[in-house]
Amino acid sequence: MQLTQSSVGRKIIMAVTGIVLVGFVCVHLLGNSSMFVGADAINAYAQKLHSLGPFVWVFRLVMLVAFALHIAFGIQLTLENKAATPEANVQVKRLKTGFGAETMIVSGLVLLAFVIYHLLHFTVRVTNPEIYVPLGGDGMVDVYFMVVNGFKSVLPVIIYLAGMLFLFLHVSHGFQSLFQTLGLSNDKSLPVTGTVSKLVGFVLLLGYIAIPLSIVFGYIKL
């Protein structure tokens, strides 16, 4: 398929915003992993973020713009590819690209829904208001208490496990795709970038599901 200049531009923006988002997901996981150290560690991490004030909101705005661009251009490119792909070649295309590639738009939209739920659950404090306990007098909450109690119910755990499975699907192909888009991959290096992409997705999957599962099985507790 002949790519237009606008399509190439959208692919590059998708790759750049993808790098930003993957970087954020990795850093976020590192911060969340302080749950394994204990209440003081995760609350100190949250307090440090809280103390940054306006910088945190600027960072959140940048992430929101990156996320919005990634979703919007992803949908546009998917519609363009679908319109330009002859129906007779659909099965061949699926055999070549694999399940992760074919479900990118689905996994992306599921992740959008998951992020909204995650914000309502732990940031906006809508879904489970009973899990928030003040910590100090500056608007902070006890993050350790919040997370442990946030995963006491079965439904949030299931939602998070499902969300992370879709994150694995999305990253395992998307990380490889950004190498190709930026011209950092060729036929020889494609298997390597494919393996690295799956490894990154798998590490993120294990890292994120480890927290709710550790709470479910009593490793992390109050």
Image: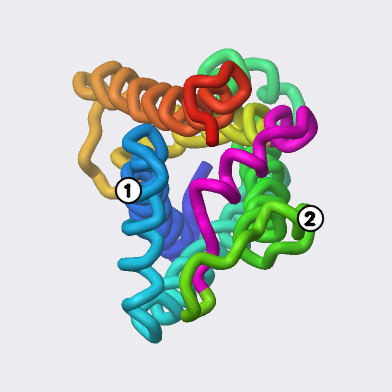
State the image coordinates of residue 157 (x, y, percent, origin top left): 68, 31
Q: Please tell me which residue lies in front, 98 or 170.
A: 170
Q: Name which residue lies at 77% across and 53% down.
A: 128
Q: Name which residue lies at 77% across and 62% down.
A: 126
Q: Please tell me which residue lies in front, 39 or 192.
A: 39
Numbered range of the magenta stretch: 140-159
Q: Please tell me which residue lies in front, 208 or 34.
A: 34
Image quarter of residue 134: bottom right
Q: How many marks?
A: 2
Q: Name which residue lies at 32% across and 43% down.
A: 30
Q: Name which residue lies at 49% across and 79% down.
A: 137
State the image coordinates of residue 181 (x, y, percent, origin top left): 34, 46
Q: Report crowding for label 2: few under 14, some 14 to 19, many 20 or more residues within 10 A (C-alpha).
A: some
Image quarter of residue 164: top right
Q: In which quadrant is the C terminus drawn? A: top right
| Residue topped by disc 2 | 127
Q: Which mark is residue 104?
A: none
Tag 2: amino acid: Thr
State the image coordinates of residue 160 (x, y, percent, origin top left): 64, 35
Q: Does residue 85 lie above or below 97 as drawn? A: below
| Residue topped by disc 1 | 41
Residue 147 falls inside the magenta stretch: yes
